[in-house]
Image: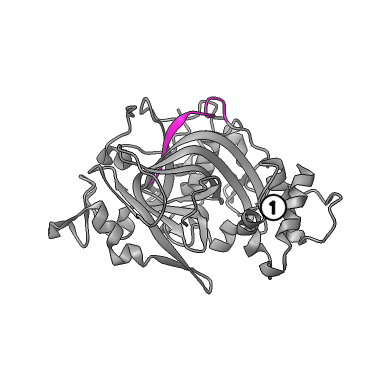
Amino acid sequence: MEQHNHPTMTQRYSGYSGSGTGSGNSKDFDDITLKLQKYSAIRVNGKRVNAFDSQYGDKFVIGFDDVEVLDGIVFQRDDKANTWKVFSPGKFFNVDPDTGKVYEQAEEDENEMSAQDILEHPRVLGFSETFGSDDYFYTPVGVVLEATEDIAMNEDIDVESTDEPTIVVGEVSMLLSNKSWVRTLAKLLTEQGNNIIEKTENEDGNEVAVTESHGWLTTMDPELRAGIAGREMELFIIEETQDFNGEEVTYTTPILLDSKTGERITIDNLDGEGDDDAQEAEEAPADDADTSDDDSPTDESEADEAADTDDEGDDETGSVEGEFPDELESLLDYFAKTDGTVEPDELRSFGEDEVENPDDVDWELGAKLVEERA
């Protein structure tokens, strides 16, 4: 088995700081929409970057191949088998930061939980989220604890694991809204680097990153940074707190490592402005500091994540006859410019929350329009 130099549990989440920009039962693993929460980790191969604008704001899209979960609890959304979330066990239980061992209540209980204990626990089996007036339910796919090299899998879901151990996900897309860690990741993965983020002037006359949902990206056609395509990397998100002018500001930042060497991946083409996560948190703490829990619904609403459309829509609908909702125009363009084809059910899974009555939409017509525009 190929050896990887990924860090131990205690190294993984505590050995890094700063942005790094300064120096269902479906067997179809294509197009898994993956939500990575802080203090969980995945191994990926770089594939593509895209962007699109939806009614909920601009989205930065990352495509990864050969994704495996190194550390965390993996969930599959019940009503969308291609939507997965990876949480730290710390969302549900107590994790010893020094050892990575998991306890149901507190470390003093001395009742260490195995991966199987976590998988079968009512807090995990009954996990759901509420957005607005809608409830969304999840089924655990598996649990992998990197620190203790322990893994447990849900036998009712056809998902593979490895002896390392890891949980195999496959090809994924990450659909990301404007947050400080997302901006940092966009800088790390794109050829545009710092220039991928739109800037504005704050009250003090300083140039800072745009923190609104719309208009935070400078281009809807980002390019994958040289050396990222096909590169095996590890990605996780940590939380940091720094003191700025006597006020503590908490924010999240991504850590991207080369899997084979364990070296942290940074960008070298900074413009010298020092526009990293820490500075953004200092300059706009009220608007942008990640003081809320990234595991919470405030990270991205389910309506938001389902509104996955692409860049500037083409008003032409081609020669295919029939009407298709105007609010889904950019979604059609997204699939036309990326895959060039889409199944009606997949198109619906991405766009049903954008329209008032999804059952009234001719999703087969939408699929034909995608092929016509490709």
Residue 291 horizontal/vertical position (percent): 42, 56
Residue 209 is drawn in which quadrant?
top right
Q: Circle 1 is placed at which residue position?
A: 331
184 and 295: which one is in front?
295
Name the element at disc 1.
Answer: helix
Residue 89 is drawn in which quadrant?
bottom left
Q: Residue furthest bottom?
A: 133
Count the numbered circles shown.
Answer: 1
Left or right of 319: which side holds 336?
Answer: left
Residue 189 horizontal/vertical position (percent): 54, 34
Please state which amino acid type lies under the numbered disc 1: Leu
Residue 266 horizontal/vertical position (percent): 46, 30
Left or right of 151: which side holds 208?
Answer: right
Question: Residue drawn at (43%, 62%), measured in percent from left and top?
Answer: 138
Question: Residue drawn at (28%, 42%), measured in percent from left and top?
Answer: 146
Identify the image quadrant of the N terminus.
top left
At label 1, counting other C-alpha atoms closer than 10 Å, the crowd grade (few under 14, some 14-19, many 20 or more) is many
Residue 339 lies in the magenta stretch? no
77 and 299: which one is in front?
77
| 129 shown above or below 51 | below
Left or right of 245: which side holds 318?
Answer: right
Identify the image quadrant of the C terminus.
top right
| 46 shown above or below 330 | above
Residue 213 seen in render: yes
Residue 368 horizontal/vertical position (percent): 76, 51
315 and 10: which one is in front?
315
Chain part drawn in magenta: 225-238
Question: Residue drawn at (25%, 55%), measured in percent from left and top?
Answer: 116
